[in-house]
Image: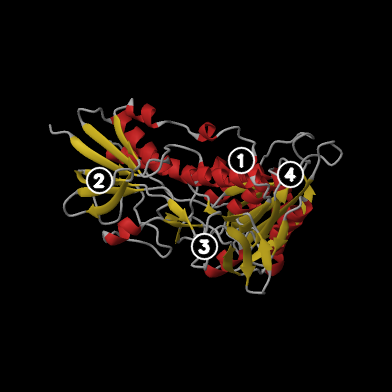
């Protein structure tokens, strides 16, 4: 039997998880695997970059789970600094360019995996390409930022502007404060953390200000101002304000990197992500799979396709893809949108729908917000914790949960994630048999207290 050829485009979480799983199922005599990665690193934790920048993680290489040499030792022909620049789907081949030599070549495939990831949103603003302006999505991005910080610090420059206050923006603002920078966070919304409802985002705003981050809401950036060397010196807003900056970090968000797929005519969703079936096979293409930050996934609560770029999903996608490529069977049923983060000692978590998500999905709902403590109130480690819960009118189906609080708050969102996945009502959540001891929880866990309040709201609205 002829050896099949698998080509993987992208050498991080989804791509190399797929390659590794396929190799477990089929040896080199059955499946030849070639993977292309445009960067200098493979199989790393992009989520850990802010903690490396901030000094909690000692070095860059601590974020790398598996080196190119380790992949090659598993009979995966991994080619670094090689970018795929064209897909010839009818011909079953990809055109690559060596980014160091500039040479190009065609490589044929029988099966193809697209794991091209996402890229930081870079608005088209004057000066956006200036030295010192950085997006942070890949480990290469992180290294470039670290190089700039070290040069800036050597020149005794210590002002930074973070544009955007989502997960990356908030985490990078904290990292820069930890390095001794005077940090300003500019964002267009009414509150930071647009992944939360504004009332919960206000708690994050207070915490950011408390730790010395100047947080400016409703700020529309219009220009990056530069000096005579072409380096950033300030950020200007539509209000006419200028904020000095030796370095600018873009935390506006990311978009799926799907130019290759678009040019090849592969199906894309509303946010530009590649569309796949439950086995992560690209719709309408039997021999092409895709996963990671370049795809759209099914939101199990709203019932629609969404772009939700998270490393947890990417690794699961890779396992599913590798199983399919290797002759096995697996599916990725969808997500409920769970994410956690922190700023200083404040933990932030959400799962399911925000109010505007529920409205966009055509759902009617009630909300319930409570403030409790992470442990028994008399226990010395008790800190305040706020929980907001959304429940559907009439049915009481749980729609979403947001949590902001001290140590021990964020991972409670996993209770809600399981409940959402199971389609539970807030009545059923109240009845959950959760663990209790004073060092871990009040007698009534805050999630259950919020569910009780949500039950009352549903009944009152009936």
- Of callouts 4 and 3, the N-terminal one: 3
Label 2 secondary element: loop
Label 1 secondary element: helix
The mark found on residue 128 in the picture is 3
Cα gap from disc 2 to disc 4, whole angstroms: 50 Å
**Residue 254: image location, x then y, percent:** 49, 56
Quarter of image, res 321: top left
**Residue 12: image location, x then y, percent:** 41, 41
Q: Quadrant of the C terminus?
A: bottom right
Mark 1 vs mark 2: in front: 2
Label 4 secondary element: loop
- Residue 340 vs residue 386, the one in the foreground: 340
Label 3 secondary element: loop
The mark found on residue 51 in the picture is 1
Left or right of residue 312: residue 210: right
Q: Which residue is mark 4?
A: 345
Q: Which residue is mark 2?
A: 103
- Label 4: how many Cα within 10 Å (few below 14, some 14–19, many 20+): few
Q: Is residue 416 visible?
A: no
Quarter of image, res 373: top right
Left or right of residue 372: residue 320: left
**Residue 68: image location, x then y, percent:** 38, 32
Left or right of residue 325: residue 425: right
Cα gap from disc 4 to disc 3, whole angstroms: 32 Å
- Of callouts 3 and 2, the N-terminal one: 2
């Amino acid at each position: 039997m002829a050896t099949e050829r698998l080509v993987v485009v992208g050498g991080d979480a989804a791509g190399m998880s797929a390659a590794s799983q396929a190799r477990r199922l089929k040896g080199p005599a059955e499946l030849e695997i070639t993977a292309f990665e445009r960067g200098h690193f493979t199989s790393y934790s992009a989520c850990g970059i802010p903690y490396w920048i901030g000094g909690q993680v000692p070095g860059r290489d601590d974020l790398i789970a598996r080196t190119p040499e380790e992949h090659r030792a598993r009979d995966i022909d991994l080619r670094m600094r090689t970018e795929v620049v064209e897909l010839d789907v009818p011909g079953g081949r990809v055109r690559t360019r060596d980014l160091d030599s500039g040479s190009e070549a065609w490589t044929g495939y029988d099966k193809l995996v697209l794991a091209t990831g996402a890229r930081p949103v870079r608005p088209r603003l004057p000066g956006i390409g200036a030295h010192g302006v950085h997006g942070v999505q890949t480990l290469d991005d992180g290294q470039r930022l670290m190089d700039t910080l070290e040069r800036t610090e050597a020149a005794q420059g210590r002002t930074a502007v973070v544009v955007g206050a989502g997960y990356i923006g908030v985490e990078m603002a904290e990292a820069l404060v930890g390095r001794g920078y005077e940090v300003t966070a500019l964002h267009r919304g009414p509150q930071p953390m647009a992944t939360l409802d504004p009332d919960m985002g206000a708690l994050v705003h207070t915490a950011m200000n408390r730790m010395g981050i100047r947080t400016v809401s409703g700020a529309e950036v219009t220009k990056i101002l530069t000096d005579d060397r072409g380096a950033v010196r300030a950020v200007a807003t539509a209000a006419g304000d200028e904020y000095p900056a030796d370095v600018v970090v873009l935390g506006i968000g990311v978009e799926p990197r799907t130019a290759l797929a678009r040019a090849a005519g592969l199906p894309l969703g509303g946010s530009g992500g590649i569309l796949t079936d439950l086995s992560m096979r690209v719709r309408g293409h039997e021999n092409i799979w895709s996963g990671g930050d370049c795809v759209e996934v099914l939101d199990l609560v709203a019932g629609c396709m969404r772009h939700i770029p998270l490393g947890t999903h990417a690794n699961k996608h890779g396992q599913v893809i590798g199983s399919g490529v290797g002759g096995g069977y697996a599916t990725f049923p969808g997500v409920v949108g769970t994410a956690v983060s922190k700023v200083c000692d404040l933990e932030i978590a959400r799962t399911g729908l925000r109010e505007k998500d529920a409205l966009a999905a055509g759902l009617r709902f009630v909300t319930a917000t409570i403030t409790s403590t992470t442990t028994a109130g008399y226990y010395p480690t008790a800190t305040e914790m706020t929980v907001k819960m959304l429940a559907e009118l009439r049915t009481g189906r749980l729609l979403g949960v947001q949590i902001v609080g001290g140590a021990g708050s964020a991972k409670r969102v996993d209770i809600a994630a399981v409940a959402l996945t199971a389609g539970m009502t807030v009545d059923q959540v109240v009845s959950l048999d959760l663990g209790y001891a004073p060092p871990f929880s009040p007698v009534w866990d805050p999630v259950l207290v919020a569910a009780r309040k949500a039950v009352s709201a549903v009944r009152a609205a009936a």
